[in-house]
Structure formats: C-alpha cells, structure tokens
C-alpha cells in the first residue's frame, strides 16, 4: 500500500483558487445579492408602512363614516321630532280653526234662527196688534158720542193751559206766521155748541199770545174729540189720531 504524499504546491494553489473564488463571489455575487436583498427588504418595509398607512387611513375613514352616520341618525331623529311637533301644532291649529268655524256657524245659525223667530213673532205681534186695533176702533166707534167728544175737549182745554214753554213757543211761532188767507181750523167728531166753541177760541188765543178766529168743522172720522190746526202746528185730542199713533208705534216694534 502506497502512502499519500502532500503536494504543498498544489495545496497552496488550491488555497489561492479558493481565495480568488471568495473574492469573486464577494465582488460580483455577494454584494449584488445583498444589495438586492436589502432593496427587497426596504421595499417590503415601504410596502408594509404604506399598508399600515392605508390601514390607518381606512380606519380613520371608517370612524369618520360611523361618526357621520351617527350624526345623520341624530339629525334624522331631531328632524322627525321637529316634524312631529310641527304636525301636532298644525293639527291643533286646524282643529282650533275648525272648532271656531263650527262655533261661528252655530252662532250664525242661532242668530238666523233667532232673527227668523223674532221676525215671525214681530209679524204675529203686528198681526195681533192690527186685529186689536181694528177691534178697539170698532169698540170706540160704538162708544163714540157727543158727550165723549165734550169730555175730550175739556181734557184738551186743561192740557192747553198746562203746555210747557217749548210747546207754547212752537204754537206762538205758528200763529205769528199765519197770513190773512190762513185760518185756524178745529175739526170735531161731533157738533160743538157755541159756548164750548168760545171757550176753545179763548183758550187757544191765550196760549198763542194773540187773538185767533178758529173755524169749526165737523169730522165724524175722528170718532170722538177734536183736532186743532194752527198753521204748521197741529194738536190732536181725538180717538182716531191716538189709535193711529199707537198703531205706528206698534209697527216700529
């Protein structure tokens, strides 16, 4: 068996080759590979940071969106409550207006009904008064007599003496403007004797403040009593004018 001999020359050459290979690997392979790995690592870090930034931005957007949704929900709820309050107010106002309208209509209807009832009652009263007037007139016609006319004349003479200052002034002014063609007319429902005519003339002249010459005319339509006309001044003391006065008063009711 042959023993292996160590060739130092070959050994040193192999060492040199190895060192050269390491240098070549270091120069042309290791550094580019490391640079590529570093660049890749940096890209991974950048992409990771970008992803983290995007994740943070997405989270911020999600929180902002949730906040907006919450705000919108609160605004929607507030709007709903406000709308309900406005609808309730509008409903209450409409009900109040309707209630007022119904009350006004009821009041108008009541007023119309009252007016119709009042008009009907007034018509009935006028009709009843007219019938009463006719009955009273018929009764007074039956009761009329020269004696009643004389009694009314005596009452007229008493009232003539009791005239107040304003009434006397009216009578005197009417007497003062009488012209020669005018006359003092006294109509009587029944014939008045000479003595009573003289009494009437004297009392009338005293009240007028001047001498008057009345003309007496018999007028049965007066029913009973007299009517004195001094120019524009008229004095009534007869049943016909009294009935007509009360009838006019009743028509104004």
Image (spheres, rainbow, N blue to C red):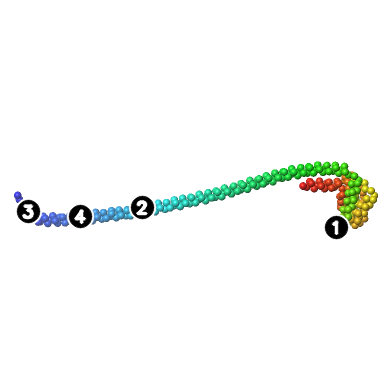
Comparing labels 2 and 4, the label whose residue is closer to the camera: 2
**Alpha carbon separation for disc pair 1 and 4:** 158 Å
Please give the label number shown on residue 118: none
Please give the label number shown on residue 5: 3
Q: Residue furthest left?
A: 1
Spot occupied by residue 1 in the image (x, y as percentages of width and height):
4, 49
**Alpha carbon separation for disc pair 1 and 2:** 118 Å
Write the residue at 8% across / 54% down. 6
Write the residue at 90% across / 44% down. 145
Task: Identify residue for label 4.
Answer: 25
Comparing labels 1 and 3, the label whose residue is closer to the camera: 1
**Alpha carbon separation for disc pair 3 and 2:** 69 Å
Q: Label 3 neighbourhood size at 10 Å, few (<14), some (14-19), many (20+)?
A: few
Write the residue at 67% across / 44% down. 109
Q: Label 4 neighbourhood size at 10 Å, few (<14), some (14-19), many (20+)?
A: few
**Is residue 37 in sight in this rendering?**
yes
N-terminal label among 2 and 4: 4
**Is residue 188 in sight in this rendering?**
no
Q: What is the tally of numbered marks visible in this picture? A: 4
**Alpha carbon separation for disc pair 2 and 4:** 42 Å
Task: Identify residue for label 2.
Answer: 55
**Alpha carbon separation for disc pair 3 and 4:** 31 Å
Please give the label number shown on residue 165: 1
N-terminal label among 1 and 3: 3
N-terminal label among 1 and 4: 4
Q: Secondary structure at mark 4?
A: helix
Write the residue at 85% across / 57% down. 165
* Near-viewer residue (187 or 114): 114
Spot occupied by residue 56 in the image (x, y as percentages of width and height):
37, 54
């Amino acid at each position: 068996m042959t023993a292996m001999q160590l060739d130092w020359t070959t050994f040193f050459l192999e060492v040199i080759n190895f060192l050269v290979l390491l240098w070549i690997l270091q120069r042309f392979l290791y550094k580019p590979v490391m640079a590529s790995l570093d660049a890749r690592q940096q890209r991974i870090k950048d992409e990771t940071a970008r992803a983290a930034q995007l994740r943070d931005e997405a989270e911020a957007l999600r929180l902002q969106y949730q906040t907006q949704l919450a705000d919108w929900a609160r605004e929607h709820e507030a709007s709903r409550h406000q709308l309900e309050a406005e609808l309730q107010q509008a409903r209450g106002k409409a009900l109040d207006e309707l209630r007022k309208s119904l009350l006004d209509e009821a009041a108008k209807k009541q007023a119309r009904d009252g007016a119709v009832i009042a008009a009907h009652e007034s018509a009935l009263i006028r009709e009843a008064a007219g019938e009463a007037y006719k009955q009273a007139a018929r009764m007074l016609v039956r009761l009329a007599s020269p004696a009643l006319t004389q009694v009314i004349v005596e009452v007229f003479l008493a009232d003539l003496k009791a005239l107040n200052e304003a009434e006397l002034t009216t009578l005197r002014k009417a007497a003062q403007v009488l012209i020669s063609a005018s006359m003092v007319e006294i109509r009587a429902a029944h014939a008045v004797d000479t003595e009573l005519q003289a009494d009437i003339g004297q009392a009338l002249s005293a009240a007028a403040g001047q001498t008057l010459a009345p003309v007496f005319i018999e007028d049965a339509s007066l029913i009973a009593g007299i009517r004195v006309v001094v120019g524009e001044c008229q004095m009534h003391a007869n049943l016909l004018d009294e009935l007509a006065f009360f009838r006019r008063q009743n028509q104004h009711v």
